[in-house]
Amino acid sequence: MKQRMKKLLLTLTSMCFVAGALAQFNDCVESGPRIKDWVCVTGSVDNPGTLDETEKIICVGDSAGTGVSGTTFNNGKKTRKIEYDCQEDEEESGEITYSPSVFWEPPIPESFPDCGIFTFTAKVKGVTGDTDCPAETEAVEVGTFTVKVVAVEDLTPSDGALIPDSSPPKYVVCVGPVDVTVTASPCPGLPE
C-alpha cells in the first residue's frame, strides 16, 4: 500500500510538472495588439447659459451685441478596444470636453444703417479640440436679443430757443456728451 501511494504521488507530481512545463511552452504567437477605431458618444449642452443683455437701444450706424455666460456641458465619452491573441483584450476610454461656441440667427450685422426693431436668437453649441472624436454637440437656444435702432432729430427751433419743459420727452437717444431728448418717435416702428 505504501508502495502504491508513493507511485501515485510520484505520478501526480510528474503530471503537474509536465503540465507546468507545457504551459511555459504555449504555442500561441501574438500578432497584436490590434487597436480598433474609437467609438464616440457626443456630449450635450447641460445649461445653455444666459444672455448678458436682452435689449439694447442704439443709434443708426452703431453696432450692438451681447455675450452669453454660464454655459455648461455634459462631457462626451470615447472608447476603443485593443485586441490580443494570447491575452485578455483591453479597453481604453476617455472623456470629451467642450467649449462654448455662440452664434446668432439671423447673424447680427456689424452696424445698423436703418431705424427699426431687430430681433436675434442666440444659440450655443459645444466644440472640442479632441481629434479622435471631433463632433460638436447639438446647438440649443439661449435667448432672444432685441436691438432698437433710433435716429436723432434736431428738434431745437431754428431761432435757438429751448424746447419747452411742457413737452414731455419720450426717448433719450444716442448718449454722447449730452443726452438728447425727443418728443416724437424718430423711427417708424417704435412705440409712441
Image (tube, helix red, strand yellow):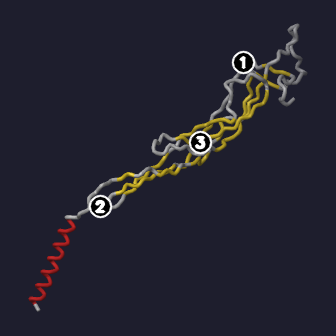
Per the image, label 2 sits on a secondary structure element best described as loop
Q: Nearer the viewer, residue 51 or 133?
A: 133
What residue does disc 2 label? 86
- What's the distance in space between the residues labelled 1 and 3, CA to CA? 37 Å
Residue 83: x and y in percent read 36, 57
Q: Nearer the viewer, residue 145 or 25?
A: 25
Placement of the N terminus among the 4 image quadrants: bottom left
Residue 50: x and y in percent read 65, 41
Specify the amino acid type for callout 1.
Gly
Residue 161: x and y in percent read 87, 10
- What's the distance in space between the residues labelled 1 and 2, CA to CA? 79 Å
Do the CB atoms of the residues marked 1 and 3 lie less than 8 Å apart? no
Residue 10: x and y in percent read 12, 80
Dot 2 or dot 3: first in sequence order is 2
**The furthest residue to the right:** 166
Task: Tell me the tag on residue 125.
Answer: 3
Residue 41 vs 144, above or below: the answer is below
Q: Residue at x 45, y 50 (%)?
A: 38
Do the CB atoms of the residues marked 1 and 2 lie less than 8 Å apart? no
Specify the amino acid type for callout 2.
Cys
Dot 1 or dot 3: first in sequence order is 3
Specify the amino acid type for callout 3.
Lys
Per the image, label 1 sits on a secondary structure element best described as loop
What residue does disc 1 label? 176
Q: Quadrant of residue 167?
A: top right
**The furthest residue to the bottom:** 1
